[in-house]
Image: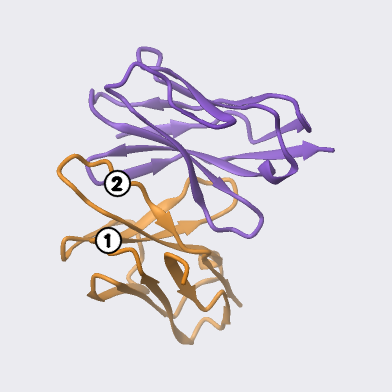
Chain colours: A purple, B orange
């Protein structure tokens, strides 16, 4: 079965600095999708960024980028120029066919 | 209208009560999901309705009963729950395609407390 591991329960970053959240996953499949979701204190979870496994190029969305290492089954999220609004729980997710698998989340604190 | 709306946002119930959670999606998606979110645990998939078929997590107790009358509405019926069922229940929807690129869109969740 697929598993997703986020080894950092909590992280903090100074405002305007850069932080990297780690995620590893286990799978025997070659075709899948990876996602980072953000859940602010108001609780609605929203998509931050996605990566298709067949694409070698790392996905980027404004200040958010990923470092996708397929062989190592690693999918980290880098947040540049951190803002107070980035404070939230971040969940890494793996999608296979029609099933999603989530990690336990990383709580990010942004220090003014 | 937000894409996925859930009601109620908060629910407190006794172990002998019967209540229901409601979810509605306005995105034209063809799949809807119930997830249970507990602290320090991965999101637990409870049920999926996809293309009018139901897939369920066999570990979900029978005191949780889903209903999906159409592709836009999803219910979770609750009956004789236990205190350990207290959690945030998230509804989500997605568009299932052959390319399998659909992401999940979540509601704000229903915070359930069982006394």
Along the line of sight, which residue is nearer the eye, A33 or A17? Answer: A17
Circle nearer the N terminus (2, 1): 1
Image point (70%, 29%), residue name: A81
Judging from the image, mark 1 belongs to the subunit labelled B
Query: Is B97 or B37 nearer to us in this picture?
Result: B97
Query: Which residue appears farthest toward the bottom when viewing the image?
Result: B17
Q: Residue at x 36, y 66 (%)?
A: B61
* Chain of the residue on which disc 2 is drawn: B
Compared with residue A96, is residue B109 higher up or lower down, i.e. above or below? below
Instruction: Classify mark 1: helix, strand or loop.
Output: loop
The residue sitting at 52% across, 26% down in the picture is A65
Give the secondary structure at mark 2: loop
> Which mark, by number, is residue B84?
none
Quadrant in the picture for residue B75: bottom left
Question: Percent position (x, y) of residue A49?
Answer: 46, 36
* Residues behind callouts 2 and 1 on a single chain: yes
- Residue count near mark 1 (Cα–Cα under 10 Å), binned few <14, some 14–19, many ≥20: some
| Residue placed most toward the observer, A38 or B66 | A38
Q: Given contact means CB atoms under 8 Å apart, are the residues at marks 2 and 1 in contact?
A: yes
Crowdedness near tag 2: few (<14), some (14–19) or many (≥20) residues, C-alpha within 10 Å: some
Q: Tell me residue B34's x, y (percent).
A: 38, 62
Q: Which residue is mark 2?
A: B102
Residue furthest right as drawn: A112
Q: Nearer the viewer, residue A5 or A86?
A: A86
Q: Is residue B43 left or right of residue B72?
A: right
Give how far across and how far down residue B5 sits, in percent. 45, 71
| For residue A31, side relative to residue A5 (left or right) | left
Q: Quadrant of the C terminus of chain A?
A: top right
Return the x and y of residue B92 as percentages of the image width and height.
Answer: 39, 59
Q: Is residue B47 above or below residue A91?
A: below
Q: Give the residue number, with chain letter if any, for mark 1.
A: B29
Disc 2 to disc 1, C-alpha distance:
9 Å
């Amino acid at each position: 079965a697929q598993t997703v591991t986020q080894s950092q329960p909590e992280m903090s970053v100074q405002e305007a600095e850069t932080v990297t959240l780690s995620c590893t996953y286990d799978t025997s499949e070659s075709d899948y999708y990876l996602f980072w979701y953000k859940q602010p204190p108001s609780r609605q979870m929203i998509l931050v960024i996605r990566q298709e496994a067949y694409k070698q190029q790392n996905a980027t969305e404004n200040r958010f980028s990923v470092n996708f290492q397929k062989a190592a089954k690693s999918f980290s999220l880098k947040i540049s120029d951190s803002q107070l609004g980035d404070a939230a729980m971040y969940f890494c997710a793996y999608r296979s066919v029609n099933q999603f698998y989530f990690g336990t989340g990383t709580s990010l604190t942004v220090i003014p | 209208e937000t894409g996925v709306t859930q009601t109620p946002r908060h629910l407190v119930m006794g172990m002998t009560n019967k209540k229901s959670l409601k979810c509605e999606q306005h995105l034209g998606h063809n799949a809807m999901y119930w997830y249970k979110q507990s602290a320090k645990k991965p999101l637990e998939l409870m049920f999926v309705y996809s293309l009018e078929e139901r897939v369920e997590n066999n570990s979900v107790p029978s005191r949780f009963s889903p209903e999906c009358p159409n592709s836009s509405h999803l219910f979770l019926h609750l009956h004789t729950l236990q205190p350990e069922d207290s959690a945030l229940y998230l509804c989500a929807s997605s568009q299932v395609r052959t390319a399998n690129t659909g992401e999940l869109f979540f509601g704000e969740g229903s915070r359930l407390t069982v006394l």
